[in-house]
Amino acid sequence: MPKPLLEQMTWPEVKEAIEAKVVVLQPLAAIEQHSPHLPVDTDNLIVGALGKSAAERYPGKFVAVPVLPDGFNDHNTEFPGTVSIRPGVLLEYLLTFGRASPPMASGASFG
């Protein structure tokens, strides 16, 4: 049975996951403010944990890949530490990931 996290797999385990037709979970978040007391990577911590949890709860159905930490975030740019990637660049990255990962990404769920 495939491991839940892609970064912990060997290439033969990735091959096994492909053959099992697992769904790839690509967590996408943002680096942004969350009030003065929380770290700017709060969203990344949450979506990373959700991806890992889903993959662990449903072994052989999902594999989570590392969090893509920088999303589109123009509404918080006045706060120091905010990182915002232009929508076109972000979309191109996601499309490139999908094209570069076949057949594993054929069932990819971006969110």
Image (cartoon, helix red, strand yellow):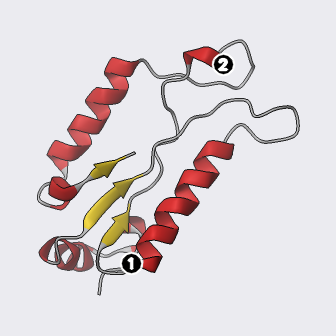
Q: Amino acid at mark 2?
A: Asn
Q: In the orientation shown, which residue stands out farthest toward the right? A: 37
Element on which disc 1 rests: loop
Say whether residue 92 is left or right of residue 48. Answer: left
Q: Residue at x 29, y 74 (%)?
A: 61
Label 2 environment density (alpha carbons within 10 Å; few <14, some 14–19, many ≥20): some
Q: Is residue 43 left or right of residue 103?
A: right
Q: Nearer the viewer, residue 23 or 31?
A: 23
Instruction: Give the residue at x 63% y 53%.
Output: 45
CA neighbours of label 1 inside 10 A, class few (<14), some (14 to 19), many (20+): few
Residue 93, placed above or below residue 100: above
**Which residue does the image show at 71% across and 12% down from the upper left?**
78
Compute the Cα span from label 1 to label 2: 35 Å
On residue 36, which mark appears? Answer: none
Mark nearer the viewer, 1 or 2: 1
**Seen from this angle, which residue lies furthest top?**
78
Q: Position of residue 71 (x, y in %)?
A: 49, 31
- Return the x and y of residue 79 as percentages of the image width and height: 74, 18
- Nearer to me, 20 or 8: 20
Secondary structure under the numbered disc 2 in the rendered image: helix
Residue closer to the observer: 26 or 16: 26
Q: Position of residue 20 (x, y in %)?
A: 17, 78
Residue 58 tag number: 1
Q: Which residue is mark 2?
A: 76
At a point 61% along the width and 16% down the height, the residue shown is: 75
